[in-house]
Image (tube, grey):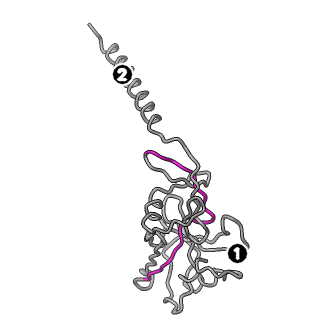
Amino acid sequence: MMNDQDTHAGGAADSGRAAAHDRAFKELRQPTPQEFDIRIAADGSWYHEGGLIGRPALVKLFSTVLRREADGSYWLVTPVERGRIEVEDAPFIITALAVSGAGEAQQLTFRTNVDDEVHLGPGHPLAMRMPSQGGEDLRPYIMVRDGLEALVARPVVLPDRPPPEFIAASTSRIASIDALRKATPAPKACARTCC
């Protein structure tokens, strides 16, 4: 006859075997890391093997599996593949800004080049920093998700018709659209509309 101690010891051994089985199964399912010849240019364009990926739907699909590791590397991760890619600056570009509300209730909603929408605030702060590939000017970046940032394109903050003043409900130090405009440098001899 088994006593409680025997039953408890057997239960612990069974759960240990189950945990080892679970770990082995997870390791089996981990895709082997690869190097994908995919690059996200500083203007937000995606390239594969040197050629522009011209289908916006495909770029959006890739953007949904984009991850950033703690070491700053970028990866496309699916259940069956995992590949490192190159990102020249930020993986996304802010292409539109919508201002709603008034006063302290005013909200800024930014849209990326892959149609992600983010509301400026503690979960999606604005930060001024140097571009990751070097440069002399501070640029505005917004956290989109999971360590993935978007560069705020200059035409977004310097449109033909300026948006009204706002008070940022975020952790950023930018308090008004005028301050954001002043902090956004003009490109030096650059014809691109992304920065």
77 or 163, which is in the foreground? 77
- The three-letter code of the residue at mark 2 reads Asp
Residue 127: where, in percent of width, then height?
59, 70
In the picture as drawn, the residue positioned furthest to the left comes out as 1
Q: Residue at position x 53%, y 92% from top? A: 160
Residue 4: where, in percent of width, then height?
30, 15
C-alpha separation, residue under disc 2 versus residue under disc 1: 60 Å
Mark 2 lies on residue: 14
In the picture as drawn, the residue positioned furthest to the right comes out as 136
Q: How many numbered marks, from 0 up?
A: 2
- Crowding at mark 2 (Cα within 10 Å: few <14, some 14-19, many 20+): few
- Where residue 140 sits, quadrant-wise, is bottom right
Mark 1 lies on residue: 137
Q: If you read the primary sequence from the N terminus, does the residue marked by circle 2 or circle 1 appear first? A: 2
Residue 138: where, in percent of width, then height?
67, 74
Q: Residue at position x 66%, y 83% from top? A: 186
48 with respect to 119 (left or right): right
